[in-house]
Image (spheres, rainbow, N blue to C red):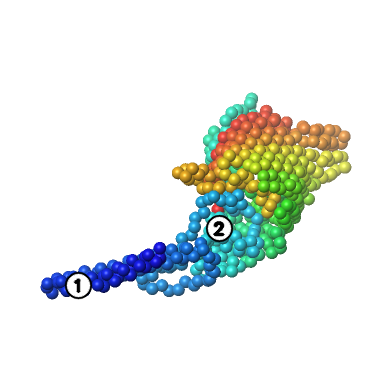
């Protein structure tokens, strides 16, 4: 094609050179000659401009052809002062290829900004695959849609990511019984569930993460901190962390909130993770993974903001979390996951009310509704702990998984007349998932958890491409009825099951992924919460409640 264009240009130039003198000689007057000369000069200038445009196109096509036929060495380019007729500025001519499919299962996963920190070598390898612009030794690119600025050797880098989730929906059939209060169960409302701006600074294997969250609660208007930590990634497949962080011990929590099958985690997972972990928990520790296993452990302290929300705290919490997970069997169509997670609070925050806490949660829907599940107040706490197994099984596009946890609470023996029990609570969930179209959920060994489906082709109805769609179901039970007996001076105060209540939730949901950055969710929830013996007759859960909810979510992640 380049030869054909050059031949046409040459032929046009030759003909014009031969033709124009004869035209000039045919003129019959000086005025006509002058007009003809001006016309010829204008045509000549236009031809020069056309030749310049054609030459630019030839160079561009040759460059693109070279990219496909041979490996090109990329050299650093420096931005120099441009001339008055040059583009301002001009960095490269070749158009970047746009990846729309078909994508392999590994390359098709949705963008998850909350993943583990990459090592320097992994960062260089990953960013080398992405289109970037070089400006005076600085590379600007968009790996996985995340704006990233890096030095030419990738030693210095800064990136910004996003996770934005907007929930909308309401409750049905949550009627009050007797004189109990109606509670807060809106028929239709909205909530900015997560609005996180992920900011990351890198110097080689040292990475600093700071992530504010403008949707850090069950109702709009709460601004908080998701994380602020320093990480070292220079050891093989290992990340060491110090700062405000979310150490993860459950498979469900390890998936990251952008990849959940449902809007929220099962209640038992939420309760366990917040004993000594949870969002913005001060942590010192690390995790290491291999192809078939992962182990992690952290010493933890208080949460960010604890002493602001309760200014009477005089002795902060300390604790620890631990997780070990493995894949005993792996094949193309089958993945088997087993693991164990454990957490302990050596001591909880000492406040003006002593060392107290209470387990409570919503009905696994975050629209600002009244919390019905509660353990009642737990006072004089010596320590708390939880532990349990994890299991997951994938066959092609079908995934089945579940977890069970037991929570133990030990009271202080403050007086010889008190016989403090070790109170126990239990909870579990079972979830099933099937990907209708797109790549099915896969296993990520870096987090030892299953992650979201893959989008083989971006949504394009004209070409019969619809993204990815999955359907899920879940059953979860959390039992906070106390087990154990408290005695004072020989008198029984509380017996088994006398305080606290139990919650059962059934979920069904559809998740659609039009591309790797957008997710649309629709969940149906049916819940049943037993009565709470310690409640007043006017409380929302005095007689127990059941009801339904339909909630949607739109999510963007970069």
Question: Toward the viewer: 291 or 425?
Answer: 291
> Mark 2 packing: few (<14 Cα in 10 Å), some, or many (20+)?
some
In the displayed structure image, the side of residue 315 where residue 187 appears, left or right: left
The answer to whether one can see residue 385 in this image is yes
Question: Toward the viewer: 549 or 24?
Answer: 24
Q: Which residue is mark 2?
A: 143
The residue under the point 78% across, 39% down is 424
- For residue 84, what is the image quadrant? bottom left
Q: From mark 2 to mark 1, how far is it between C-alphas?
A: 61 Å
Q: Nearer the viewer, mark 2 or mark 1?
A: 1
The residue under the point 43% across, 74% down is 81
Q: Which residue is mark 1?
A: 22
Residue 254 x/y as whole percent: 67, 49
Q: Who comes first in sequence, dot 2 or dot 1?
A: 1
- For residue 431, what is the image quadrant? top right
The residue under the point 33% across, 68% down is 9
The answer to whether one can see residue 181 in this image is no
Question: Toward the viewer: 21 or 304?
Answer: 21
- Counting the numbered discs, the total is 2
Residue 343 x/y as whole percent: 75, 48
The residue under the point 53% across, 71% down is 75
> Mark 1 packing: few (<14 Cα in 10 Å), some, or many (20+)?
few
Query: Please, is residue 250 above or below residue 501 in the view?
Result: below
Q: SS for tag 2?
A: helix
Viewport quadrant of the N terminus? bottom left
In the displayed structure image, the side of residue 521 where residue 288 appears, left or right: right
């Amino acid at each position: 094609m380049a030869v054909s264009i050059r031949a046409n240009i040459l032929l046009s130039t030759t003909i014009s050179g031969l033709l124009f003198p004869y035209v000039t000689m045919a003129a019959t007057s000086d005025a006509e000659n002058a007009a003809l000369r001006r016309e010829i000069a204008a045509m000549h200038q236009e031809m020069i401009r056309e030749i310049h445009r054609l030459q630019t196109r030839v160079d561009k096509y040759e460059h693109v052809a070279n990219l496909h036929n041979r490996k090109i060495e990329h050299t650093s380019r420096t931005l120099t002062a441009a001339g008055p007729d040059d583009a301002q500025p001009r960095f490269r001519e070749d158009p970047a290829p746009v990846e729309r499919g078909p994508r392999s299962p590994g390359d098709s996963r949705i963008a998850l900004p909350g993943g583990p920190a990459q090592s320097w070598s992994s960062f260089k390898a990953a960013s080398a695959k992405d289109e970037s612009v070089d400006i005076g030794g600085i590379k600007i690119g968009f790996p996985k849609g995340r704006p990233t600025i890096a030095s030419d050797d990738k030693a210095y880098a800064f990136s910004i990511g996003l996770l934005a989730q907007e929930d909308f929906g309401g409750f049905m059939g949550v009627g009050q019984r007797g004189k109990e209060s109606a509670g807060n169960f809106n028929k239709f409302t909205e909530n900015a569930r997560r609005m996180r701006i992920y900011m990351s600074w890198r110097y080689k294997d040292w990475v600093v993460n700071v992530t504010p969250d403008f949707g850090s609660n069950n109702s709009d208007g709460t601004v908080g901190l998701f994380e602020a930590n320093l990480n070292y990634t220079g050891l093989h497949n290992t990340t060491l962390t110090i700062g405000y962080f979310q150490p993860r011990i459950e498979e469900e929590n390890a998936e990251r909130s952008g990849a959940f099958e449902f809007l929220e985690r099962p209640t038992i997972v939420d309760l366990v993770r917040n004993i000594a972990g949870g969002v913005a928990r001060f942590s010192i520790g690390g995790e290491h993974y291999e192809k078939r296993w992962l182990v992690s452990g952290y010493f933890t302290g208080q949460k960010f903001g604890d002493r602001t929300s309760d200014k009477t705290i005089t002795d902060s919490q300390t604790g620890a979390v631990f997780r070990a997970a493995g894949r005993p069997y792996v094949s193309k169509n089958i993945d088997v996951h087993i693991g164990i997670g454990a957490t302990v609070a050596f001591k909880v925050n000492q406040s003006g009310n002593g060392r107290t806490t209470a387990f409570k949660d919503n009905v696994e829907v975050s629209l600002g509704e009244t919390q019905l599940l509660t353990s009642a107040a737990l006072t004089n706490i010596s320590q708390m702990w939880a532990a349990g197994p994890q299991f997951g099984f994938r066959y092609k596009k079908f995934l089945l998984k579940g977890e069970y946890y037991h929570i133990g609470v030990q009271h202080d023996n403050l007086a010889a007349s008190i016989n403090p029990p070790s109170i126990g609570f239990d909870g579990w969930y079972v979830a099933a998932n099937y990907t209708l179209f797109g790549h099915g959920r896969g296993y990520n060994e870096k987090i030892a958890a299953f992650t979201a489906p893959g989008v083989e082709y971006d949504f394009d109805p004209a070409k019969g491409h619809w993204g990815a769609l999955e359907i899920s179901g879940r059953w979860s039970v959390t039992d906070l009825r106390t087990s154990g007996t408290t005695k004072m001076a020989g008198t029984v105060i509380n017996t088994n099951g006398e305080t606290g209540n139990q919650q059962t939730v059934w979920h069904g949901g559809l998740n659609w992924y039009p591309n790797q950055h957008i997710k649309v969710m629709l969940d149906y929830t049916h819940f049943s919460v037993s009565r709470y013996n310690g409640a007043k007759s006017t409380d929302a859960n005095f007689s127990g409640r059941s009801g339904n909810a339909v909630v949607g979510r739109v999510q963007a992640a970069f």
